[in-house]
Image (spheres, rainbow, N blue to C red):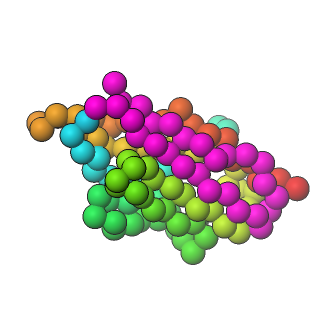
């Protein structure tokens, strides 16, 4: 059974920083792309940032130059460093990973989500 577990959310003032972490555990062959999504109340879930197994990254325009995604392949972890946070960044943040569970089977996995609230 593969699981993604996020940590690091919380309440922060505007202009502050937070670092989210996501750990993949269980039995699998390899992890392909890992990503962070977010969903604010009443809105759809949107991509925030993604990183391939080779380290190529992609960001939503709204977070470019403020957020940085990284991963540690040896630890099966992905991180999201969030700086200069704004109230509009308030959302539940979800970790996502495309995982090869067997040589011929690839499955999308989601974490349970972690709340990030930016407020004074």
The image quadrant where one finds the N terminus is: top left
Q: Residue at x 78, y 54 (%)?
A: 12
The x and y percentages for residue 117 are: 74, 48
* Residue 113 x/y as whole percent: 57, 37
| Image quadrant in which you'd find residue 72 | bottom left
Query: Is 117 placed left or right of 61 in the picture?
Result: right
Residue furthest to the front: 74
| Residue 67 counted in the magenta span | no
Q: Would you say residue 44 is visible in this rendering?
A: no
The x, y position of residue 20, in whole percent, is 59, 51
Quadrant where the image shows the C terminus = bottom right
Residue 41 horizontal side relative to residue 103, left or right = right
Q: Nearer the viewer, residue 48 or 76?
A: 76
- Residue 73 appearing in the image: yes
Q: What residue range appears in magenta?
A: 1-27
Residue that lies at the very extreme toward the bottom in this rendered image: 65
Of all residues shown, which one is farthest toward the top? 1
Q: Quadrant of residue 88?
A: bottom right
- Measured as percent of width and height from the top left, residue 91 is found at 65, 45
**Residue under the image location 24 percent in, 45 percent down:** 30
* Figure disc tally: 0
Q: Is residue 10 magenta?
A: yes
Q: Residue at x 21, y 40 (%)?
A: 29
Q: On the picture, is 75 further left or further right than 10?
A: left
At a point 41% along the width and 31% down the height, the residue shown is: 3
In the image, taking residue 24 as reference, residue 15 lies left or right, namely right
| Quarter location, residue 84 | bottom right
The furthest residue to the left: 104
């Amino acid at each position: 059974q593969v699981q993604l577990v996020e940590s690091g959310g919380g309440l922060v003032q505007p202009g502050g920083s937070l670092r989210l972490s996501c750990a993949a555990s269980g039995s699998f062959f390899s992890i392909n792309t890992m990503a962070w999504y977010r969903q604010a109340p009443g809105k759809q879930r949107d991509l925030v940032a993604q990183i391939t197994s080779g380290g190529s990254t992609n960001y939503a325009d709204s977070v470019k130059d403020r957020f940085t995604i990284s991963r540690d392949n040896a630890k099966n972890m992905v991180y999201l460093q969030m700086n200069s946070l704004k109230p509009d960044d308030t959302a539940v943040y979800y970790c996502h990973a495309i995982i090869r569970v067997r040589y011929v089977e690839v499955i999308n996995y989601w974490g349970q989500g972690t709340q990030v609230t930016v407020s004074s």
